[in-house]
Amino acid sequence: MKKPSNLSEISRRDAMKLITAGSAAGILGLLGSPEARAENHSTPSYATGVPPVKIKSVRAIATAPEGSNLVLVKVETTEPGLYGLGCATFTQRAMAVITAIDSYLNDFCVGKDVDNIEDMWQSAYVSSYWRNGPVLNNALSGLDEALWDIKGKRANMPVYQLLGGKCRFAVDCYAHASGPTPEEVAERVQQFMDQGFRHVRIQQGGYGGVGTMEKKPDFLEAGFGKESDSFSDQHTYLKRVPEMFDMVRKRCGEDVELLHDIHELVEPIDAINMIKELEQYHPFFIEDPFSPENMKWFKHLRASTTVPIAMGELFNNINEFRDYMVDQLFDYIRIHISQIGGITPAMKIARLGEWFNVKTAWHGPGDVSPAGHAANAHIDLAVWNFGIQESHFWSEKAQAVFPGCQTYKNGYMYINEAPGLGVDINEKEAAKYPIGTRSRWTVRKSDGTIIKP
Ligand code: GCO
Ligand code: MG
């Protein structure tokens, strides 16, 4: 640009440039130094002057007050007294999860900001390159739930409030009625109805009728397998389930909602035929008709019967079930939340289900810890498409280990309405109940063939 001798010679564009530079300088003046600008942008008012809280340690705590191995993650922070507790319970391989937490997650997390849960989830999830699967996902879940616990404590509100608040006053649950004979099952159902439960799961003996088969299996006669291996006579089981439903309906009436868990212990085609037979007893849902290895059978099941189906405690990752949810091939998602990595992914699955009318029925027996049950319940309270929650009544020993355990009244689960997830741990008490390594999942047919539980 040619240098002007006096103002009259300055072109309009040069003039405009001068004006803008002038006003920019003005604005800069207003905002003050670049540091001040950065400060204003990155530290919102509610956090001004509050030092960011960092992760000080990530530690596994294992205990078995009721015999089932429970694994928890405790995340301690740089803020004195502020810590979080999350469930990482994979009861059959607890030791492996403990190693994943203490030897890997701790290193990965120390010094990081407690606030960025999604970023922590995503980065920890891929930090092992090879990912997914029950061990790493459970470890990740413990971390994730502990961070939600911390965020609730920092916000001074229960986690369900951070998830959008309550859609219902409490969590409707189903109880477990089992017994060696249909008569005893019916008696248990009546007892739960008298306690106010509207939903009861009925099982005769163990899954697949294990433990109620009179005949000694041929494989033991032949010296194949181990004495401790379980035996399921599928034919007997398939005959007995409709008889059990018939007995319970006759004794307890039509109003109680009845559930049953096939636990994928029969051939898929037999499961379909049995479920068709159960239509007359209008079950609330039939659970896990097939193993995750047999997902293709769902379209045949859906084409054969309208009995509501629940699926999924064995699912590890979204690829195993997303398309089946989208195609509405089952009605209730039964995920073991720590198996997929905690509250963060579970909320996404619940939200996905809403669009396809798939409701939640999170896995919740005794091998989900009280912190895990709390995670279930906070989501159950907050999502619109809640279906039902599996209940577990904690023993006094467990309540001593876990202050803030859930309570039940009139068939509803109530959480501890405290900031965070509401469940704490007494490590001295927890240490009284060391975990074991025994796993009992070997179920055989009479000829010794392994059945996928
Ligand atoms: C259920 C489940 C459990 C599992 C157990 C495995 O519906 O509650 O099927 O009973 O078998 O959690 O360890
Ligand atoms: Mg089940």
Image: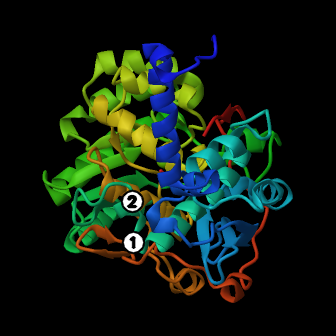
User: Is the residue under label 1 in contact with that under label 2 (CB below 8 Å)?
Assistant: yes
Pick the residue in front: 134 or 282.
134
Location of residue 352 with respect to 268 vertically, above or below: below
Quarter of the image with the C terminus in it: top right
Q: Residue at x 77, y 55 (%)?
A: 105
In the drawing, does residue 123 fall left or right of residue 324? right
Residue denoted by label 2: 162
Q: Please say whether residue 333 is visible from this viewpoint.
A: no
Question: What mark, if any, has residue 157 been given in the picture?
Answer: 1
Q: Please say whether residue 56 is visible from this viewpoint.
A: yes
Within 8 Å of ligand 1, the CB of disc 2? Answer: no
Q: Residue furthest front?
A: 5
In 3D space, how far apart are the residues under numbered discs 2 and 1 (Cα atoms)? 8 Å
Q: Residue furthest right?
A: 103
Name the kind of residue labelled 1 in the image: Met
Residue 231 position, x and y percent, is 63, 45
Residue 324 position, x and y percent, is 43, 23
User: Which secondary structure, mark 1?
Assistant: loop
Q: Residue at x 23, y 72 (%)?
A: 410
Question: What mark, if any, has residue 172 been given in the picture?
Answer: none
Among the 4 quarters of the image, the one containing residue 75: bottom right
Location of residue 48 with respect to 233 vertically, above or below: below
